[in-house]
Amino acid sequence: MLDKLITEIDRGLKTLSIPSIESRPYPGSDIKETQPLSESDKRKHAQLMRINHSGEICAQALYRGQLLFNKNPKIQIELEKAASEEIDHLAWCEKRIDELDGKTSRLNPILYAGSFAIGSLASIIDEKYNLGFLAETEKQVSAHLESHLNMLNPDDKKTLKILETMKLDEEKHQGSAHALGAKKLPKIIETIMKKTAKLMTSSTYHI
């Protein structure tokens, strides 16, 4: 267990300090940005993508925490697959933030540590609740991405394509968790998750 924990700490440090490398093509790479965004839209979109990047940092940490104590091979496969696709999301968000002349959040190390702890706790409690936690996380992330899609200037087709692709992945992860027998979480846990997510989004928008 100590070796696994050391490996996860190393993985976390690399996630936070080294640019992510995607395994799938960058969505919208073939889209020509013929209509330049105004400076206000550009700044707003960079801030929204910073929130999404921090959300992916949280998701990556959650999955790694859930994997730390998981003993079910089927769940491990699903969590590792989801974590791998979240790395793509991280890379895409980082690239788009850079294109929009934005910066990632300084709160990411704190968010990673907290999310890793929550994921580890969920894995210890019960594997079906572990899956339920995964399903609810993906559900809330999908809703969050949908709200951002509605906030973007429609002329920013590249950012739209990135978020649409990410949303499809999150919905797929949610469906896979349910297929493996995810338990519905108690209402109080869902509420806490929503309030925590709201705190994260409001803080990373500015910091």
Image: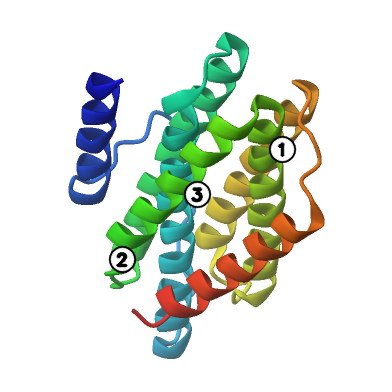
156 or 62: nearer the eye?
62
In this view, 130 is above or below 70: below
Image quarter of the C terminus: bottom left
The residue depicted at 58 percent of the width and 22 percent of the height is 78
Q: Are marks 2 and 3 in contact (CB under 8 Å)?
A: no
Which of label 1 and label 3 is nearer to you? 1
Which of label 1 and label 2 is nearer to you? 1
Q: Position of residue 116 (x, y in %)?
A: 41, 45
In this view, 47 is above or below 81: below
Find disc 2 in the rendering and name its residue.
104
SS at circle 1 = helix
Distance Cα–Cα, label 1 vs label 3? 32 Å
In this view, 88 is above or below 67: below
SS at circle 3 = loop
Q: Is residue 8 left or right of residue 117?
A: left
122 or 112: nearer the eye?
122
91 or 199: nearer the eye?
199
Q: Is residue 88 shown to the viewer in this render?
A: no
Task: Bin the neighbour count of mark 2 within 10 Å (Cα to Cα): few under 14, some 14-19, many 20 and up.
Answer: many
171 or 42: nearer the eye?
171
Q: Is residue 207 left or right of residue 6?
A: right
Find disc 1 in the rendering and name its residue.
132
**Amino acid under disc 3:** Gly
Find disc 3 in the rendering and name its residue.
28
**Which residue is farthest bottom?**
40
